[in-house]
Amino acid sequence: MSQINVVHFGHAEIRRDEMYCFGDFIKRTGIAIGILNRSRDDGLVVLCFQGRAFIRGGDWIDWYIRRAVAKPDQIPDAGPTPADLRGEVPHE
């Protein structure tokens, strides 16, 4: 599996190779401070330096992927693909 380097979350990009101060991360993603604090309790790494908190983009992406759960019943079915219609896809 290839490494994910950019995640579009909220109205902004979170990049693996960047570090965000806590306030900027909240503005970029729209995530409430309470949710971020619970995320810290759940293993999200937050770095503190001289009284300021920072989140590395790579730490956020890795944490988010570990918590992501695919729910097949919530993924909309787009219907048959052209390959389905041509009979190229085996169905059981």
Image (cartoon, grey):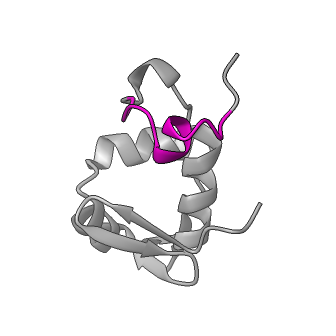
- How many circles with numbers are drawn on the protein? 0
Query: Residue visible at 54% across and 60% down?
Result: 60
Residue 11 percent coordinates (x, y): 22, 65
Q: Main secondary structure of the magenta part?
A: loop
Kindly give the residue lying farthest to the right in the view shown.
Answer: 1
The range drawn in magenta is 77-89
Query: Residue visible at 37% across and 67% down?
Result: 22
Front position in the image: 68 or 77 = 77
Query: Residue visible at 26% across and 47% down?
Result: 32
29 in magenta: no
Q: Quadrant of residue 83?
A: top right
Front position in the image: 63 or 34 = 63
Q: Quadrant of the N terminus?
A: bottom right
Q: Quadrant of the C terminus?
A: top right
Q: Is residue 29 left or right of residue 64?
A: left
Residue 7 percent coordinates (x, y): 45, 66
Q: Quadrant of residue 66?
A: top right
Q: Is residue 37 left or right of residue 32?
A: right
Considering only vertical position in the picture, is 17 above or below 81?
below
Q: Is residue 23 left or right of residue 77?
A: left
Considering only vertical position in the picture, is 91 above or below 53?
above
Residue 13 percent coordinates (x, y): 36, 73
